[in-house]
Image: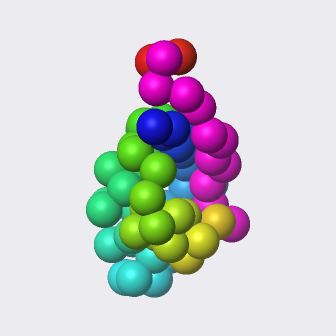
Amino acid sequence: MSNLKIKLIRGRAGKNKRQLATLDGLGLTKKDKEVIKPDSPQIRGMIRKVEHLVEWEEIDSENL
């Protein structure tokens, strides 16, 4: 099963409540923070809502 490595590349200041809630749900609280999440439709949807603020890449679970 693959995972997604997600990194917050832009700051949270000035974003609306829904974007901040999505970032909180992903666990991205500070700029340049990286998290690893399982690849699922729910996580992909969250990434899509804040795609202008994050970078992401697929990684294999063996590379953790």
Give the residues drawn in magenta, as a range.
52-62
Tell me the residue at 40%/68% (across/down).
42
In this image, 21 relative to 34: left or right? left
* Observer able to see residue 9: no
Q: Position of residue 46 (x, y in %)?
A: 47, 69
| Camera-side residue of 30 and 41 | 41
In this image, 3 relative to 26: left or right? right
| Camera-side residue of 6 and 59 | 59
Name above or below for residue 27 compared with residue 23.
above
| Camera-side residue of 14 and 51 | 51
The residue at the far top in this view is 63
Q: Position of residue 51 (x, y in %)?
A: 64, 66
Tell me the residue at 31%/62% (across/down).
25
Name above or below for residue 34 compared with residue 47.
above
* Observer able to see residue 51: yes
Q: How is the image coloured?
A: rainbow
* 29 magenta-colored: no
Q: Quadrant of the C terminus?
A: top left
Q: Position of residue 60 (x, y in %)?
A: 55, 28
Q: Position of residue 47 (x, y in %)?
A: 54, 64
Q: How many marks?
A: 0
* 57 magenta-colored: yes
Tell me the residue at 48%/17% (across/down).
62
| Camera-side residue of 26 and 42 | 42
Tell me the residue at 59%/71% (across/down).
48
The residue at the far front in this view is 1
Our reading of the magenta stretch's main secondary structure is strand
